[in-house]
Amino acid sequence: MMIDESQLPPRQYIRILYAKGEAVKFISHHDEFRLWERALRRADLPLLYKQGFNPQPHMQFAAPLGVGITGAREPLDIVLAPPLPVEEVTARLRAKLPPGVSLVDVRELPGKPTALQNLIIGADYAIVLYAEPGEIDGAGLQARIDRLLAT
């Protein structure tokens, strides 16, 4: 069965950059997907769903973060139909996100975007060690790092 594209409502492609903070760093990628699905639904956004037996929302993450890792600018693409002003999307979402998740940027994309997985070329990681002054010997720490990187 052919679908007549002219009968479909116009689609709006939105890219969201968000921060995943300490309060949610221990949730899995699957739970993070559900977190966003619920937040988008609670924000009453006209999220477009895929067709099929078990419809899923048109949402695409770039790369899942490991459990226990926070993220400063995590990308997420969504598709809305019909379109809404980006400012309204931002305001509605910001009001419904749980503690630990915050919006960094929300923008409309001109047309269907390239898959996020194809755009990511790398990631920067920072490891923060909490210790009392003098508790960690700098030379000893560097030796441990070198051993870890050698494995």
Image (tube, helix red, strand yellow):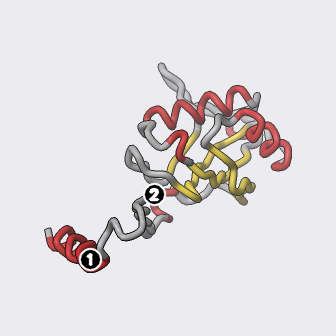
Circle nearer the N terminus (2, 1): 2
Q: Nearer the viewer, residue 21 or 3?
A: 21
Q: Secondary structure at mark 2?
A: helix
Q: Which residue is mark 1?
A: 142
Image coordinates of residue 71 in percent, x first then y, are: 52, 55
30 relative to 8 in the view: left or right: left
Residue shown at the point (62%, 43%) measured from the top left = 101
Residue shown at the point (62%, 28%) measured from the top left = 38
Which residue is the extreme one toward the left?
Answer: 151
Q: Which image quadrant is residue 57 in?
A: top right
Question: Mark 2 is on which residue type?
Answer: Gln
Q: Which mark is residue 44?
A: none
Image vertical order of residue 137 relative to residue 103, above or below: below
Q: Quadrant of the N terminus?
A: top right
Would residue 7 be visible to someone looking at this image?
no
Residue shown at the point (72%, 60%) measured from the top left = 110
Image coordinates of residue 15 in percent, x first then y, are: 66, 53
Q: Quadrant of the C terminus?
A: bottom left
Q: How many marks?
A: 2
Residue shown at the point (75%, 31%) measured from the top left = 43
Image coordinates of residue 130 in percent, x first then y, are: 42, 59
Q: Nearer the viewer, residue 86 or 96?
A: 96
Q: Which residue is mark 2?
A: 117
1 relative to 14 in the view: left or right: left
Q: Which image quadrant is residue 100 in?
A: top right
